Image: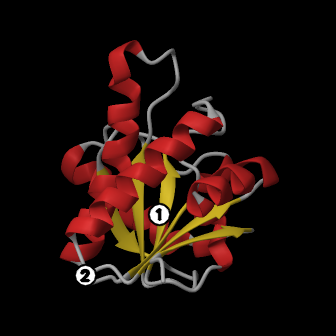
Amino acid sequence: MSKIKILQGDITKVDVDVIVNAANTSLLGGGGVDGAIHRAGGSQILDECRDIRARQGGCDPGEAVITNAGNLPAIKVIHTVGPVWTGDNEGGQRAVLASCYLESLKLAIANNLKTIAFPNISTGVYRFPKDLAAQTAFKTVQDFLLKNEVIDEVIFVCFDLENFNLYQKLLDS
């Protein structure tokens, strides 16, 4: 049985060890999934993000940081910053997007978190093409899981039907 699952719905309601947030570099919340996670999780997440900012000045694209999950059903939230799509010069933006998934998985393992839910990073206001983002995310996670047996389950939580269908095709193939 595959460790990868696809779900259409609201990532803030998924019962996993860690939810990944498609954050911005400021870590102070925003629109889309970032705003939804901050609203549902409450002020504890924002307070911890402010502490991280004070220590290291935010989070760069392709990197990840971790906070408690506040009022969310998860234990932790991993905040990762995806690339803003400007055209993929020689795969650079795909590499940054892949790094978001890799760094999040590594952080989950470092914190003994075995189930993880990912949103569709960079496909909203950052305009990363949904099909290319899905392929990059799926392959990165699949390759990681082949080499690392610590993670029990990865759920790609798709807010919209278009992303859900793209991921479902990848899972079925």
Q: Which residue does the numbered mark 1 point to in the structure image?
A: 20
Way the structure is coloured: secondary structure
Determine whether, in the image, residue 83 is placed left or right of residue 5.
left
Instruction: Establish if 56 lies above or below 75.
Output: above
Q: Give the amino acid at mark 1.
A: Val
Q: Nearer the viewer, residue 62 or 42?
A: 62
Q: Which mark is residue 70?
A: none
In the rendered image, residue 32, in percent from the top left (x then y), is placed at 68, 49
Rounded to the nearest whole Å, what is the CA distance between mark 2 and mark 1?
17 Å
Instruction: Establish if 34 lies above or below 26.
Output: below
In the rendered image, residue 88, in percent from the top left (x then y), is placed at 44, 18
Secondary structure category for the residue under label 2: loop
Residue at screen point 34% across, 15% down: 90
- Determine contact: label 2, label 1, CB under 8 Å: no
Q: Give the amino acid at mark 2.
A: Val
Marks counted in the figure total: 2
Q: Nearer the viewer, residue 144 or 2?
A: 2
Instruction: Establish if 1 lies above or below 28.
Output: below
In the rendered image, residue 36, in percent from the top left (x then y), is placed at 67, 61
Q: Quadrant of residue 6?
A: bottom right
Residue at screen point 37% across, 66% down: 48
Residue at screen point 66% across, 54% down: 169
Quarter of the image with the C terminus is bottom right
Q: Quadrant of residue 50?
A: bottom left
Q: Quadrant of residue 103?
A: bottom left
Determine whether, in the image, residue 13 is placed left or right of residue 24.
right
Determine crowd level at label 1: few under 14, some 14-19, many 20+ residues with C-alpha closer than 10 A.
many
Viewer can see residue 51: no
| Badge nearest the viewer, 2 or 1 | 2
Instruction: Establish if 86 lies above or below 164.
Output: above
Residue at screen point 36% across, 23% down: 91
Q: Which mark is residue 150?
A: 2
